[in-house]
Image (cartoon, rainbow, N blue to C red):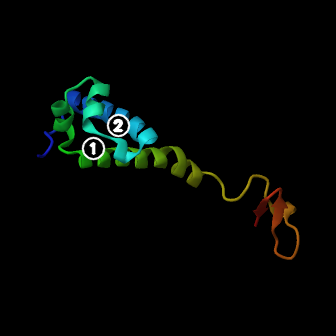
Amino acid sequence: MTPAAPTSKGAATRDMIVERAYMIAASAGLEGLSIGPLADTVGMSKSGVFAHFGSRKDLQLAVLDTAALRFGEHTLIPALKAGRGLPGCGRSSLTGSTGCARIGAAVCC
């Protein structure tokens, strides 16, 4: 079964379902994500939730897409925008023949 084309209300409902499913999967894992308990959590029937995804697998894939987007937004993109190396690792802090500095347990090259 293919999910129906989203409307603005349908898209908002789907986003709300995915958000709750994401929270469940974050604590119980993807295998702990089931349409029945999720439907109870969001106050819908199982068929109502099923209509947005078509299958448990499609729901799990939507949760994975959300996790990937969040990882990109909150971790990957900020890390790529940050300067390379540890803060304070400049030419003046170079030591030894390798040109690396040791700061605590970290090594700055």
Give the residue at mark 2.
21
Rendered position, 81 above or below 33: below
Residue 100 location, x and y as percent? 81, 68
Q: Which residue is mark 1?
A: 59
10 Å crowding of disc 1: few (<14), some (14-19), many (20+) = many
Q: Secondary structure at mark 1?
A: helix
Closer to us: 60 or 70: 60
> Is residue 43 shown above or below 11?
above
Task: Assess whether mark 1 and mark 2 are in contact (beta carbons under 8 angstroms).
Answer: yes
Which one is earlier in the sequence, the residue at label 2 or at label 1?
2
Measure the C-alpha gap from mark 2 to mark 1.
Answer: 8 Å
Q: Amino acid at mark 2?
A: Ala
Query: Residue extending furthest left?
Result: 1
State the image quarter where residue 53 is shown. top left
Give whichever of 54, 66 is nearer the camera.
Answer: 54
Q: What residue appears at the point 27 percent right and 43 percent down from the top-left corner?
A: 59
The image quarter in which residue 94 lies: bottom right
